[in-house]
């Protein structure tokens, strides 16, 4: 495709406009927290800027901190103007539109109160009685320990009762429990006062365009699906690598660790999107049922096999992006003898017909060599027989790389003959980056998910069975690590502990390089294109 074609596709085919969501009052618990100012309100601002919110919609922040409407609006504006609408936006930032902000801000209000007490829910009820719309969305942007109390308070106040012309929905941020038992208890507490259809368990990873494109790539292109099984795929790697450390989240991370923070939600959701069977329809119930089946088919390793199929690591001091950075134990609010893992690698098996004997290797970690979230699908190599008698000594595998960040897109590695009189084969790449084909508006990643909450589309949200199936697969690791919580140190700026590389080498495989340069017209990384001659 020529550059002219690219420009025509970007400029000549505008995205179909979605209708604005229904008039709603959105209550945000934990309104003075970081999540609200960094992501939620900027997302709502972007949705309103794009005409996707009803003009009558109002946003009510609920928290114990002292604010009135004006001071709360000023607190939010200062952050959005300085950072969120610019530096923190995917697809390039936009300056804060002062006129638009003034109009939008008039619909933002603040309710001071302790949401562990019943009084605040009576105030919410009174606010709704005066609102133009009976629709209400309750968003829990709080610490997880408050989720159950907020749900119970809403239920006792009768705030989750729906009618013919009104909806009541609750949004819960991850983590959904900290183990299988607590996840079951939280789900039971929520379901005491509301129906499953009213619960939106949000995972911001699923708001990314590339994650949703996994479904389109698989099921809208006849090229992929015939080869999407154990006959052609050797193994699949899922990576979520970060260069940042724990920053100001030391106290939270000490209780969580990389496993609880990333695996049963982000990584397992990516695994499910890759591994599901074709759903009967492109709708919430059908899609979530298939995801639940995949997560239910994850093999729960016996405790004696957990260690050989997993790695726990913790970053030490090192050098990253030309700066010296401290080790995890030197971070604020971290115990100097902490054995909390900042890195996890694990081998999972999906025991169903499509994926039998295909390993899924998962890894996530902080202070790694590059920021990179990707799914790397390794196909089995082509037969070598036809190249006997030539200078080609072996066949490389084809790779399909789906990169979620930082360079969203898809790339395919395949074999081609190097020009010249002799038969020499190199690995070359083809693919696309989203930014080269589509105009990406400034976004935080929450816009799609919040819009879906407001319109009642649960396709990208986790259901009770997917939550419990995920924790069921993770629980053997948590139990084994509770008995032996040793961690292996790795240098900040590296690709993780040596044991993680050993995990794959035992199977005759190796990790796809973190942060490998990919993209149309990009020269292969040294070492990735191998001259296959003696």
Image (cartoon, rainbow, N blue to C red):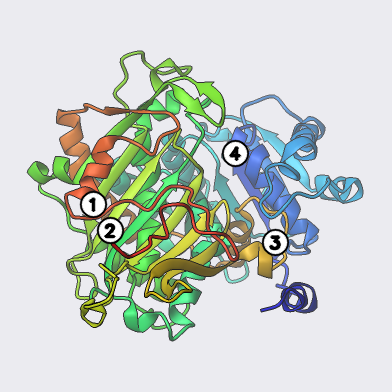
Question: Cβ–Cβ below 8 Å for labels 1 and 3?
Answer: no
Element type at marker 3? Answer: loop
Question: Cβ–Cβ below 8 Å for labels 2 and 4?
Answer: no
| Image location (x, y in percent) of residue 32 | 64, 32
The residue carrying mark 4 is 35
* Badge 2 density bin: few <14, some 14–19, many ≥20, Cα 10 Å: many
Across the whole image, how many numbered discs are drawn on residues? 4
Give the number of the disc on residue 182: none
Q: CA distance from mark 2 to mark 4?
A: 32 Å
Which of pointers 2 and 4 indicates the residue nearer the eye?
A: 2
Element type at marker 4? Answer: helix
The residue carrying mark 3 is 440
Q: CA distance from mark 1 to mark 3?
A: 35 Å
Which of pointers 3 and 4 indicates the residue nearer the eye?
A: 3
Quarter the N terminus occupies: bottom right
Identity of the residue drawn at 26% across and 28% down: 487
Q: CA distance from mark 2 to mark 1?
A: 6 Å
Q: Is residue 422 above or below residue 260?
A: below
The residue carrying mark 1 is 347
Quarter the C terminus occupies: bottom left
| Dot 2 or dot 4, earlier in sequence | 4
Question: Cβ–Cβ below 8 Å for labels 2 and 1?
Answer: yes
User: Looking at the image, which is closer to me, 326 or 306?
Assistant: 326
Q: Is residue 132 visible?
A: yes
Identity of the residue drawn at 32% across and 61% down: 236
Q: Is residue 353 left or right of residue 378?
A: left
């Amino acid at each position: 495709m020529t550059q002219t074609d690219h420009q025509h596709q970007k400029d000549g085919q505008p995205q179909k406009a979605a209708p604005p969501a229904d008039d709603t009052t959105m209550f945000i618990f934990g309104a003075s927290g970081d999540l609200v100012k960094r992501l939620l309100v900027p997302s709502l601002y972007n949705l309103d800027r794009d005409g996707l919110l009803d003009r009558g919609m109002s946003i009510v922040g609920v928290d114990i901190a002292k604010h009135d409407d004006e001071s709360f609006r000023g607190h939010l504006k200062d952050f959005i103007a300085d950072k969120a609408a610019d530096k923190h936006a995917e697809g390039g930032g936009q300056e804060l539109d002062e006129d638009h902000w003034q109009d939008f801000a008039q619909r933002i209000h603040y309710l001071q109160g302790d949401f562990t007490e019943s009084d605040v829910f009576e105030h919410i009820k009174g606010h709704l009685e005066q609102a133009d719309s009976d629709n209400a969305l309750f968003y829990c942007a709080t610490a997880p320990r408050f989720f159950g109390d907020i749900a119970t308070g809403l239920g006792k106040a009768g705030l989750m009762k729906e009618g013919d012309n009104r909806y009541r929905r609750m949004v819960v941020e991850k983590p959904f429990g900290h183990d299988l038992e607590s996840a079951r208890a939280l789900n039971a507490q929520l379901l005491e006062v509301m129906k499953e259809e009213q619960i939106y368990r949000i995972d911001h990873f699923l708001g990314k365009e590339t994650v949703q494109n996994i479904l389109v790539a698989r099921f809208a292109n006849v090229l992929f699906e015939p080869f999407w099984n154990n006959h052609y795929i050797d193994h699949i790697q899922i990576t979520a690598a970060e260069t940042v450390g724990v920053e100001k989240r030391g106290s939270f991370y000490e209780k969580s660790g990389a496993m609880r923070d990333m695996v049963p939600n982000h990584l397992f959701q990516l695994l499910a999107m890759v591994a599901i069977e074709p759903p009967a329809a492109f709708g919430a119930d059908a899609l979530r049922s298939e995801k639940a089946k995949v997560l239910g088919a994850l093999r729960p390793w016996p405790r004696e096999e957990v260690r050989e199929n997993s790695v726990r690591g913790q970053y030490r001091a090192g050098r990253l992006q030309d700066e010296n950075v401290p080790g995890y134990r030197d971070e604020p609010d971290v115990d100097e003898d902490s054995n909390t893992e900042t890195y996890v690698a694990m081998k999972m098996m999906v025991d169903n017909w499509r994926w039998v004997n295909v390993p899924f290797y998962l890894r996530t970690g902080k202070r790694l060599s590059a920021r990179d979230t990707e799914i790397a699908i390794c196909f089995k190599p082509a037969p070598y027989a036809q190249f006997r008698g030539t200078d080609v000594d072996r066949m490389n595998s084809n790779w399909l790389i789906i990169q979620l960040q930082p360079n969203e897109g898809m790339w395919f590695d395949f074999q081609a003959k190097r020009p010249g009189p002799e038969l020499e084969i190199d690995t070359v790449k083809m693919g696309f980056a989203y930014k080269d084909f589509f105009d990406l508006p400034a976004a935080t990643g929450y816009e799609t998910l919040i819009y879906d909450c407001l319109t009642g589309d649960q396709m990208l949200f986790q259901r009770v069975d997917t939550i419990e199936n995920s924790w069921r697969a993770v629980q053997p690791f948590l139990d084994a690590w509770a008995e032996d919580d040793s961690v292996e140190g790795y240098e900040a700026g590296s690709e993780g502990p040596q044991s993680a590389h050993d995990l794959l080498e035992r199977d005759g495989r190796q990790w796809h390089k973190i942060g490998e340069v990919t993209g149309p017209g990009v020269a292969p990384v040294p070492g990735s294109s191998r001259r296959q001659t003696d």
